[in-house]
Image (cartoon, rainbow, N blue to C red):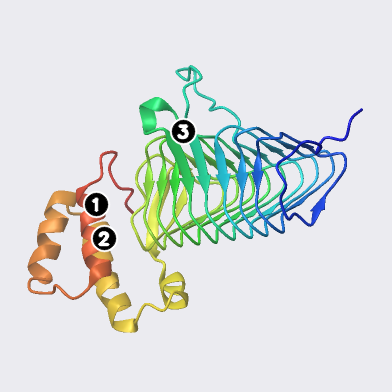
Amino acid sequence: MATRTLKRKPVATTDIHPTAIIHPNAELASRVSVGPYTVIGERVTVGAGTRIGAHCVLEGNTTLGADCQIFTGAVIGSIPQDLKYRGEDTALIIGNRNKIREYVTINPGTAGGGGKTVIGSDCLLMAYAHVAHDCLIGNHVIIANSAALAGHITVEDRTVVGGLVGIHQFVRVGELSIIGGCSRVIQDIPPYATCVGYPAKVFGLNSEGLRRAGVKSDVRDRLHRAFRILFYSKLSMRHALEELARETAGDNHCPQLQHLVTFIQQSKRGVCRA
């Protein structure tokens, strides 16, 4: 069998295993390493310093950023698991410094969902996690083992999705929230919330996550008060938002509070509550 890397575009790579199958039109930047028996397709672009392990498959119109680590058996860019998909030209875009662990699967977008799946930078996707078509994942996101994200999901920055969590299509997950393991998520997860359950419910403010992110104590106190009104007052969400607006009238200096309110106001699936 011929060596799989012959006739490729010349690149300053450091370590491509001779058993790797790399299409001549694939674009690999400098310092890329590719492990044994990995397959890289024609339209794949890999950024500088990225390390790809053994038995991985990268295919489709996939762009992978710099200094990522892809571990054994990951399948990145295979066609969406969507019966409406008809082979249209869609994309998967992955940022820099991501760690994608063993047997993770990530699909590109569909024409009906915007045409692209996007994962930001500095994320950790643990073993067997799945990110479906048209998902938009922010930066510094952690998705734990065997969590499954259905199509059209938005996950904002610095979110933690626990192991074995299932998230329904079109759900939004707010920034700096954390979802406990084995939860079933069928409504939007509010920013800054700790949620768990089947279905997931709000159990309080993610105070530790906010502290670690450098959010000041006075802002955490404002969010605590807002959470009491929004999720524990027994008011309808509309009336809770009105009550919160009265209590915080004139307070235009807390972007986290404004983001929380706007996120809830823009929800189409409804927001999970206590």
Write down the residue under mark 2: 260
Write down the residue under mark 1: 264
Q: Examine the rendering and report whether any part of residue 144 can be seen.
A: yes
Q: Give the tally of numbered discs.
A: 3
- The kind of residue tagged 3 is Gly
Q: Nearer the viewer, mark 1 or mark 3?
A: 3
Q: What whole-number distance in Å separates the C-alpha atoms at marks 2 and 1?
A: 6 Å
In this picture, residue 156 sits left or right of residue 146: left
Rendered-image quadrant of the N terminus: top right
- The kind of residue tagged 1 is Ile
Q: Nearer the viewer, residue 229 or 221?
A: 221
Q: Examine the rendering and report whether any part of residue 233 can be seen.
A: no
Q: Nearer the viewer, mark 3 or mark 2?
A: 3
Write down the residue under mark 3: 109
Q: Position of residue 223 (x, y in %)?
A: 28, 70
Q: Secondary structure at mark 2?
A: helix
Q: Secondary structure at mark 3?
A: loop
- The kind of residue tagged 2 is Leu
Q: Residue furthest right?
A: 1
